Image: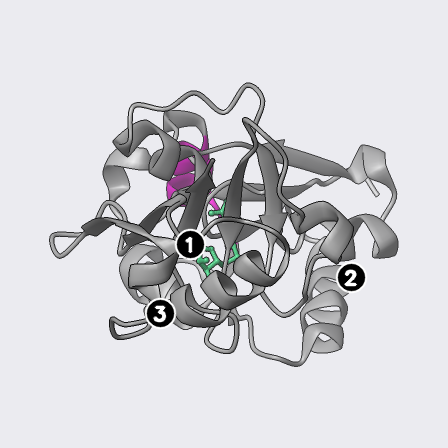
Amino acid sequence: MSHKIIIAGIGPGSVDYISPAALNAIQSAKILIGGQRALNYFATNDQISFTITANISAVIEFIREKILLDDVVVMVSGDPGYYSMLDTLRKNFPADSLKVLPSISSIQLAFARLALSWNNATLLSFHGRRPTDNQLKFSEGKIIGMLTDSKYNSKTIAEILIANGWSGDSKFFICSRLSYDDEKIISTTLNEALTIEEIKHCILIVKS
Ligand SMILES: C[S@@+](CC[C@H](N)C(=O)[O-])C[C@H]1O[C@@H](n2cnc3c(N)ncnc32)[C@H](O)[C@@H]1O
């Protein structure tokens, strides 16, 4: 297989956070795969495109067929190295057939918005999964950055953190719609987060 599967990060939303390398690969692709929203934004009539849905085997099958013709560019949100289709593609194709083009991750942008380094942060995902209590448990100086979904949101995660030894007064940042015009960063505490409307599909950062 001489053609490559190019996994291009598209950043958290705004094109400002796509790397030039990823944008160039997307714009010059002959075969382009992505979620419907990404395709609506980037795909042109000259490109062969395929929409990613819950049917991942269909995506793999499409790639197997089209890779014989040309490179295939797969768009993923944020950075491909952080909870994307990359792991699935690595399980299905040899590593040397994959080329990863990084962009800015939503978690990276959340830390940037708070002017906080992530040197010593614990990065966890609640997106379709739940980290272990051991990963979540409080310790002095700990910072956790978290991906979320609709079940695990700003309220349910605040409860889980308190149950894992975090004080209700711990600083809690709710970062939603990062890079979009309606981006919102709420700086609150775990106790207060239990009393306000839950926010889903955001980045949460808790800090002791
Ligand atoms: C499947 S993960 C993809 C993560 C992606 N690879 C990245 O690096 O940002 C989807 C989760 O990322 C977070 N996310 C993605 N875009 C976001 C944005 N613009 N603002 C806040 N959170 C975002 C949410 O927690 C969402 O549920």
Q: Which residues are magenta?
A: 22-31
- Mark 2 or mark 1: name the one nearer the start of the chain: 2
Residue 46 drawn at (x, y percent): 37, 58
The residue shown at (37%, 24%) is 116
Q: Label 3, on which residue?
A: 194
Report the front residue among 123 and 2.
123
Q: Amino acid at mark 2?
A: Arg
The residue shown at (42%, 51%) is 204
The quadrant in which the N terminus is found is: top right
Q: Amino acid at mark 3?
A: Leu
Is 17 in the magenta? no
Residue 31 drawn at (x, y percent): 54, 55
Q: Quadrant of residue 17?
A: top left
Q: Along the horizontal axis of the image, is 94 left or right of 162?
A: right
Q: Check mark 1 vs ligand 1: CB closer than 8 Å? yes or no.
A: no
Report the front residue among 43 and 183.
183
Q: Number of labelled discs? A: 3
Identify the secondary structure beneath mark 1.
loop
Rendered position, 100 above or below 195: above
